[in-house]
Amino acid sequence: MMASSQTAKDIFFEEADEHLTILEKGLLQLEDDADSENVELIDRLFRSAHTLKGASALLKFNSISEISHELENLLESYKAGTVEITASLLDAMLSAIDTMRNLLQMTHLPDYEQSAVLYGLQACQMLQAAQTGEHLQDAPDIENENNRQFSNSVKVSVDKIDLMMNLLGEMTITKTHLLDQLRSFESMKEEIDFARERLLVEVASFAERYEYTNPEEEQNVDDSESIISDFEELEFDRYDELNLFSRKLQEISNDINEAVGSVRQFFGQVSVDVEAIDRMTSEMKERISEVRTLPVDELYQRFKRSVRNLSRSANKPVELRFSGGETRLGRTIIDGLFDPLLHVLRNAVAHGIEDAEQRLAAGKPETGVINITTCRRGNYATITISDDGGGIKFQNIRNKAIALGWISAEDKLERQEYIDMIFRAGFSTKDEADDTSGRGVGMDVVLDRLADLNGTIEVKTTEGEGTEFILHIPLSLVIINVIQFRIGKQLFVLPSSLIEEIHEITNLQIIDEHVIHHGENYRIIDLNRKFNLPATDLGEQCVVFVRTLGSRIGMLVEKIISQEDTVIRPFGQLLSDMPCFSGTSVSGSGAIRLVVNPTRLLQVVDKIETDVSSMPVDYTQEITSVHQRCPRVMVVDDSLSVRKYASMILEGNSIDCITATNGLEALEMLDEEEVDLIVTDLEMPVMHGYEFLTEIKRRPALRNIPVAVITSRSGAQHQEKAFSLGAIDYLVKPFDEDALLNLLREHTLFSI
């Protein structure tokens, strides 16, 4: 009970600070706009004073309540025209706000009660005197008294914590990139080890054959041979150039072997350090996430009053119970959960809990019970809202669906299909609307809000016994563990908290786009076909089993790439209505990946299959167009430095780049590759730039590709020749990054 009371106080302190800020800013604005009538501003100030009065009285902060009451009376009188806000009255009101703010900071002091009464009385007297035109001494400055006690905590803006979390997200991306580089080195190390072993074998074999061979007998013995001619062969080693070369090879191979060992040892230590960075990053994420999180009980306490009002309005006695309130969730998650949970509670009171007479007749207690249970499982939380009401009545759903024309009287549906219907927009089994329900707005909102949070919902019901709504929610929306997979040539990610299992397609028997897995019927969605992305390799296809909206689906993907922590960025305003996806993620190498949202994917697929004619947008084309936003440029130049420099610029701006050393090589590549822009030199071996331009324009499949020339030739004659052959632009070396990117901006539809 003590913990619950302290939680309520913590909530009040935060709320009170917000209201005091509103009052302070509003009064100052009122002073600036003294000549204009601002009814909306006065109403806002009045509401804040009124809310602060009620909340402080509820938690026995009586002095704050009394001061708020005086402010409320003054604002009401000003609104009625009986009081004029003079400069002295405004000073008194601002001073009263300072008093309340300081009183909030004094609550931990042992003599708070006595001090609060004194300061509260003085502030009220000051307000009353200012209203009548009298002048009293300003409310005492109690800030100095606060300084006698030092708190072990500080107040930090949520924006600053969000900034820290974003920086940590960037660190996570960098860490992932570093891990990718280390994995690449592991592959390189294996190749180096293999080459080293081959070298050692060859050198050993060579040395064995030639190290101790006898020098060729020559008729003319040189001076050095004559010097040692007195020695027998076994008494003095004789070396020719082959012997010396053999020994040098052995020495070099030994040096290489030693260097490879040192490199292996160095990167072994780097791997250990990266693992330590990985652990520290994970711990930092946990610690910062804790600062950014709140106990979910703070959310639940807001429902007590709502359920009380709903209970009275429906004339049904209802008791709301909580468990697991200490589970902590991100502030964004908690804010996003309020609406969906409130809708579920409304639904439980309106449709689930029976009238008192019906409950008694069914042998149930007169008072209905709604339980909200929360528990943490790995990186996500499970919130279960259960009631002991009458359960979902499938016949009522069927009758309403027939009346709405969604199904015919002959259609036979599974239980899950009936449950899915309650989440469709416009559905309600009530014939008449009231303040609680019947307007067809509610459960579809729940689904939509949960999709925004990358959450899912599952419904279990037993007629006559009650219903459970089970929500699966990630603990945070900032850094999320994901699975990366490939469709065609594009990479996507999916939050791992949504995944049940992953299986290779060879282990499954798919019939008519369905598969029975663990006794459950899963619908298979082929993402290559749905996203209109041609498959490149079907040898490693997998099915990712996920649960959404209570439905079970399996997403068929080409290949699972990796699992990692990443930052998910929401779409900007331009792409805010993108179907199937909830945002983007940047890989360690800088590639942008779309985040698949299974709930919205299922909705889009259903819409495509059931009502193609009513779709305002061809979603598959829109999805494809998003991926085609990554441009591809071909650089043709015989200079390795130019090719490398141009590639670095383009790839550094997320532009795919392929290179060729001359026009003929470029044409051979263009038979297999598609590009959006070609940048070519003029002077090259085999086929020069002018010949290349001529051949490009001669071929129907290539003539529409824009070709720009970058050359060291700046003469007008060279430029005229290039333009006459179809070049769209002409740059003179040396060129910089802006010049190269401007070619893409000016001559393609891509925005860089």
Image: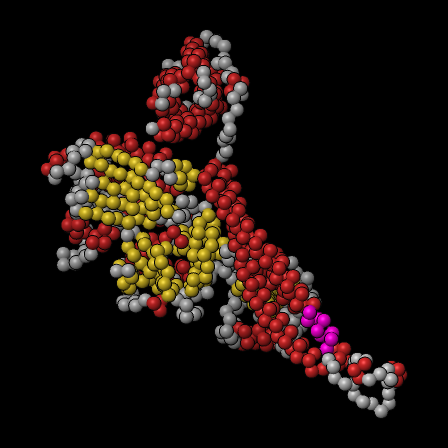
Residue 231 visible at all? yes
Q: Residue 445 occupies which quadrant of the picture?
A: top left
Q: Residue at x 34, y 67 (%)?
A: 507
**Majority secondary structure in the magenta region:** helix
Q: Position of residue 137 (x, y in %)?
A: 50, 10
Image: 217 above or below 297: below
Q: Quadrant of the N terminus?
A: top left
Viewer-side residue, 345 vs 735: 345
Decide which of 749, 141 is in the foreground and name it.
141
The one nearer the camera, 497 or 485, is: 497
The location of residue 490, given as percent across then percent down, is 45, 62
Q: Is residue 174 visible?
A: no
Q: Position of residue 151 (x, y in %)?
A: 51, 26
Q: Quadrant of the C terminus?
A: bottom right
Name which residue lies at 16% across and 35% down.
365
* The residue positioned farthest toward the top in the image shown: 134
Of 298 and 73, the residue lying toward us: 298
Residue 662 in the figure: left or right of residue 147: right
Q: Is residue 87 above or below residue 495?
A: above
Question: Residue at 65% of width from left, 61% of height from top?
Answer: 262
Identify the image quadrant of residue 385: top left
> Residue at the spot x=69%, y=69% of the render?
254
Residue farthest along the bottom direction in this orientation:
219
Boundaries of the magenta span: 246-254
Image: 516 above or below 108? below
Give coordinates of residue 220: x percent, y percent.
Answer: 86, 90
The extreme left residue here reads: 361
